[in-house]
Amino acid sequence: MYSLLLVIIYIAFISLGLPDSLIGSAWPVMHRELQVPVSYMGILTMLISGGTILSSLLADRLTRKFGTGLVTAVSVFLTAAALFGFSVSGSFLLLCIWAVPYGLGAGAVDASLNNYVALHYASRHMSWLHCFWGVGCSVSPYIMGYALAGHSDWGLGFRIVSVLQITLTAVLFLSLPLWKKSAGNTAGSTGSSAGQDSKKDAGRPLSISRMLGIKGVPLVLATFWSYCALESTTGIWASSYLVQHREIDAETAAMFASLFYLGITFGRFLSGFVADRLGDRRLIRLGTLTALAGIILVLLPLPIHLPALAGLIIIGLGCAPVYPSIIHSTPDNFGAENSQAIIGVQMASAYLGSTFMPPLFGILATHVSIGLYPVYLLLFGGLMLFMSERLPKAKSLKV
């Protein structure tokens, strides 16, 4: 039962990654067919992010009332419906409408699944699960590429992923008894007991004001926010920085920008082998210091470009263990009874960082200089290190 449910969760994490890169892959064709400016993708992503933030904040209430299995199944169904809606939309307005369930489904399942794994499975699984998210994120552009190249139909790409999500929804509904049985057993290395999990499910939802009153929660939120700001800004602006500031050809720049994401995916695969031995705190520190080393390589004004290009890969490797380790350490830091609520707010904080900080850099690049790219990244890397190093001092103080 334990192993079968784990397989289902791994598949669910692949599914989580599939929709994340679909719009970006299809938008160069979509915006022309829909006759809207290319900048309108920002409107869609903001609507999706808004829904994701809202459902992340509601994840604690929903999970306590309905359980992780049902919340996950319904959330994946919402995403599947939204993807199908995208595939048949002939106007930008319809896309905006479907963007709402697109975001609502993503946030709830992300927060609920991450908390479930943090409570019931060892740290290595959290790293490998997020590696599988990267696999899903990497596969969907190929699906969209097949739809565009073979059929000149971006809607087909969304429909293919929608069918995959609907299939997963059916599997998740059939697996609901497994979630209930697993919740009554102790699993992994978090030290969470069945009694603790039952207490968490039975207790009242934790309000945001109460959460912020827990010593250490503002620190972990700031850590998560700065991490996601760093990751998203690095990936989105890497090519532009290399081309415009370093004067590297566009093909090479695009390749190394994609290697940043490959570094994250491969780094999470590798960190899974040492996660249980090193522990979450050490992994967060090691990853942050590695990312900072990569940023410094990008920052160095050297006449050759290889250090900067290698720096992007190193930033990705450094980012790899931070996100899953922060999530996995939440029950230990703040108690199993509080972890779902705090992970939900962590997700919301993460989406705020990834949604607003890259556009802010775009303003700086336009009005000051795109050469500020590594300095901007250094600020977030430094903040992440400072906040995460202060967090263990508050570890024993819980509600």
Image: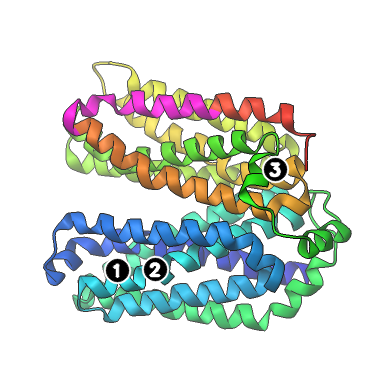
Q: Position of residue 95 (x, y in %)?
A: 28, 71
Q: Which residue is mark 1?
A: 96
SS state under label 1: helix
Identify the mark at residue 164; answer none if there is no mark: none
Identify the mark at residue 100; answer none if there is no mark: 2
Q: Position of residue 57 (x, y in %)?
A: 56, 57
Taken as a whole, is the magenta stretch helix, strand or loop? helix
Q: Are marks 2 and 1 in contact (CB under 8 Å)?
A: yes
Query: Residue at (49%, 81%) from the top-left corner?
Result: 166
Specify the quadrant of the image occupied by residue 93. Answer: bottom left
Q: Position of residue 343 (x, y in %)?
A: 62, 51
Mark 3 or mark 1: whose residue is earlier in sequence: 1
Q: Amino acid at mark 3?
A: Ser
Magenta span: 366-384
Query: Residue at (46%, 42%) from the top-left corner?
Result: 228
In the image, 364 versus 326, the foreground residue is: 364
Query: Residue at (26%, 44%) from the top-left corner?
Result: 254
| CA–CA distance in space, label 2 to label 1 | 7 Å
Identify the mark at residue 329; answer none if there is no mark: 3
Instruction: Give the quadrant of the N terminus.
Output: bottom right
| CA–CA distance in space, label 3 to label 1 | 36 Å
